[in-house]
Image (spheres, rainbow, N blue to C red):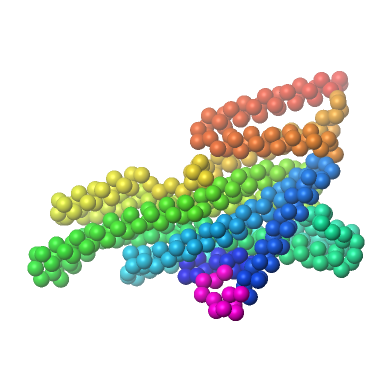
Amino acid sequence: MHTLPLSFALLTYTGYWRPVNLTSIKYWAYTIYSVAMNFLLHSFTFCGLVDCFISEDLKTFIEKFSLFLSVLGVSCKVTNLAVRRQEIINLTDMLLDDICVPRNAHELNIQQRFDRNAKIITICCEILNESAAFCLIAQFQHFVNTRTLPLYDWVPYDISSTTIFWATLLHQTIIIMICANTSVAHETLISGFMIQICAQLDILCHRARILPDLLQEARKCSITKEDFKMRERQLIREIVHHHRYVYRFAERINAVFTLMIFVQFTISSTVLCLCIYQMLTTNLLSVEFAYSSSYLGSMLIQIYLYCWFGNEVTLKSTEIGNAVYEMDWPMLPVDLMKTLLIIITQSVKPIKITSGYIITLSNESFMKVNGMISIMIHLAILKIFLIRGADYQFVMYGVEQCDKREGTIKFLQLLLRFLYKLSYQDYNREYRLLCQDYNRIMNNEILLIINSYKYI
């Protein structure tokens, strides 16, 4: 693909994006490869779902459920890519329109700068996700010696045979790497399209600033007054058309990816809470802690990419009015000023990329997640005090087994309350309410501890 080549290349190698122009033999060969990769992924997702429900304790359930959510998210992304394939191709073709193509060295530098940023972000995210995957499969020798699997223990067949066990172990190892690459490709694809919006807005601002100079050149090149008027109308028509074209491009991106952004936002927020809980109950020097840390970083980066570039798109779209105002507009005709005034008025309503038309992607949304996570850390620390009658034990390196049904329900209720609070736009009010809930819980826990130990 001519746009975001690295992201599309990762999707192609993993079997989830068929190149556009393939010959007959290559087309069918890639189709077979794609069907096989989809079968491996979705069968792996099904095994993870079953394995979560047969977990024997809360700690095991949390570990497997967090992994299942990530794999489920990858399955949803792959399905969305297949369903929206033609719309995504149309998005890339929109950037080939004459109005979007750079026309001089300065515009070419702008486009290359944003393309380079998209490439660097893809490489960095790939390194981070592969690090998390490597930490997960680093215990390969341990899996072989104990005849256990890296992720899910349940499979719909007997793995007592050495051949079948090795085939299953290889299957899960491959799927881990595939999920890591697919996740990177999808996240950088969405953020990459946001980067392209920013590039087009920068090019539009540049063209708006140099409009008086272009009009001066048009005046010199015009033979008659009618010829100059025609050139003048053409220049202002291109500015207005480019402005509306970028807004339409952003609307289509939002329509294609808003549901998947919402799914990823929800999954990442939930997995963040689960990762924090795992890190608090894992040995600091263990491989599990390293995996949870890198996994936590991957989830944070996914949310951060969406929020940061969504915020950049909003800010860039408001700069168009400033660019028009900064030009030497007093020398322009009155009718031209009226047209530019429409652009300034339109820029007052900036472009907003949303998550399921509920959460606006911005730095404020990311800080909202961080604020909620800090509360979750304190709540998770409180959960380390396991209650068994009047007996309390502080567990630092492992969570003792507790009643699966009761523990699971309580933990899921906590996550649902977190996601419910997250969906509110009035962040300050909800944050204060959640802090009050936390303080009340802490006070109750302290009173219970004091009452349980007579010598305190």
Residue in the picture at 55% in, 58% down: 83
Span shown in magenta? 18-28
Identity of the residue drawn at 71% across and 48% down:
66
Q: Is residue 146 above or below residue 373?
A: below
Q: How many labels does the image show?
A: 0
Residue 365 x, y percent position in the rendering: 52, 42
Inspect this view and state whether residue 107 appears. no
Asked if residue 81 lies left or right of residue 382, the reply is left
Residue 20 part of the magenta-drawn span: yes
Q: Nearer the viewer, residue 18 or 419?
A: 18
Question: Image check: 278 left or right of 245?
Answer: right
Left/right placement of residue 4 relative to residue 343 reads right
> Is any part of residue 405 visible from this angle?
yes
**Dividing the image into 4 quarters, which one contains the C terminus?**
top right
- Residue 262: x, y in percent? 56, 47
User: Image quadrant of residue 442?
Assistant: top right
